[in-house]
Amino acid sequence: MHSEPFVDTLKKWFEVSMHRSMRNFIHYARNSGLSMSHFGALFHIQHRGTSGVTELGDHLGVTSAASSQMLERLVQQELILRTEDPDDRRVKQIVLTDEGRRILEEGIRARQGWLDDLAKTLSDDEKETIKLALDILIDKAKTLKQPIEPES
Amino acid sequence: MHSEPFVDTLKKWFEVSMHRSMRNFIHYARNSGLSMSHFGALFHIQHRGTSGVTELGDHLGVTSAASSQMLERLVQQELILRTEDPDDRRVKQIVLTDEGRRILEEGIRARQGWLDDLAKTLSDDEKETIKLALDILIDKAKTLKQPIEPES
DNA sequence: CTAAATAGTTAAGAATGCTAAATTATAAAG
DNA sequence: CTTTATAATTTAGCATTCTTAACTATTTAG
């Protein structure tokens, strides 16, 4: 069924982390009054530095109308700033406000807090081995084709 | 700002994998006609082996009524089976059907496919180092307090 | 046996999020 | 300059999802 044990291990660790992370994150999102999609949007905006309305909609798999409506709510909550792109005034530039960045980072912390606990169970030797390995993965991931929106 | 570089690396890898995985997953979910919550439910049911209605609702952060309605739809789509618990006939036992398991696994594949590509960029030595490291992490994660629903 | 608690469902109504279509503004092509 | 294309928004309507409250069935406690 599977190609090789190495890839299985890679996938296994991913599933373990996903499962550990989601519960806290779901509850944080709910208490903060934002949906998972809202967080997805904030995350995408931060990651891209800035983002247009349509592009964000494509990322989330919805129409530009839906994207526009969602962003309108985030503007009202003062989590994002929406300004004209001076180079092409049809386009809007979307960036996070300080509050938006704060909320996002708090969400990420909720999602990753368990990693602090995990680190405490590791010896210094183990940490060294693991850090070396993860640095390779992080580095190689950068060389992979970026998951950019398809043009068509 | 951060405790130690090791934990930063741990978190960094998690963020990189999350970001890589979500785009494909979002689009797969959309095309399959299921919401992210539906997948969350299917995943939780598989992971727990079986699950009650209220417990699943707690996991997803919704009332038992909402959980019940959602499960009703999954039953109609023949993705889950809902039967009486013989030990306590107030309780329903929820399990995946074969089709439910298939859909879930396809979603997981969509989410993890990029890891196959990543593996191809690694040398055998690197793979060995990484496998060793991840095996430690997977093992230690098991010893952590399980993220079980709080009783109250 | 009766009363209280628990699990799940159902119904009604509110909120949310989505789409398609029309609209406005700007840019690019001829 | 005119036409066409693009980006975003607004509107109207629809589908989904959630909550609260009422209800049924079953179990547990007294």
Image: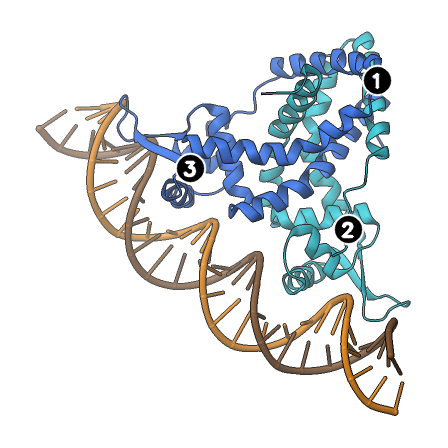
Chain colours: A cyan, B blue, C brown, D orange
Question: Residue type at mark 1?
Answer: Ser
> Could you give the CA–CA distance between mark 3 and mark 1, rounded to whole angstroms?
40 Å
Residue B26, image x, y percentages? 63, 44
Secondary-structure class at tag 1: loop
Q: Nearer the viewer, mark 3 or mark 1?
A: 1
Relative to B103, does residue D4 appear above or below in the rendering? Answer: below
Residue drawn at point x = 82 percent, y = 18 percent: A133
Q: Which residue is mark 1?
A: B123
Q: Dot 3 falls on which chain?
A: B
* Marks 1 and 2 on same chain: no
Q: Which residue is mark 2?
A: A45
Q: Dot 2 falls on which chain?
A: A
Question: Residue type at mark 3?
Answer: Leu
Say which quarter of the image contains residue B89. Answer: top left
Q: Which residue is mark 3?
A: B79
Residue A17 visible in the picture: yes
Residue A137, image x, y percentages? 81, 25
| Mark closest to the chain's N terminus, 3 or 1 | 3
Residue drawn at point x = 74 percent, y = 18 percent: A119
Secondary-structure class at tag 3: loop
Q: Quadrant of the C terminus of chain A?
A: bottom right
Residue drawn at point x = 74 percent, y = 61 percent: A53
> Could you give the CA–CA distance between mark 2 and mark 3, rounded to whole angstroms?
35 Å
Q: Nearer the viewer, mark 1 or mark 2?
A: 1
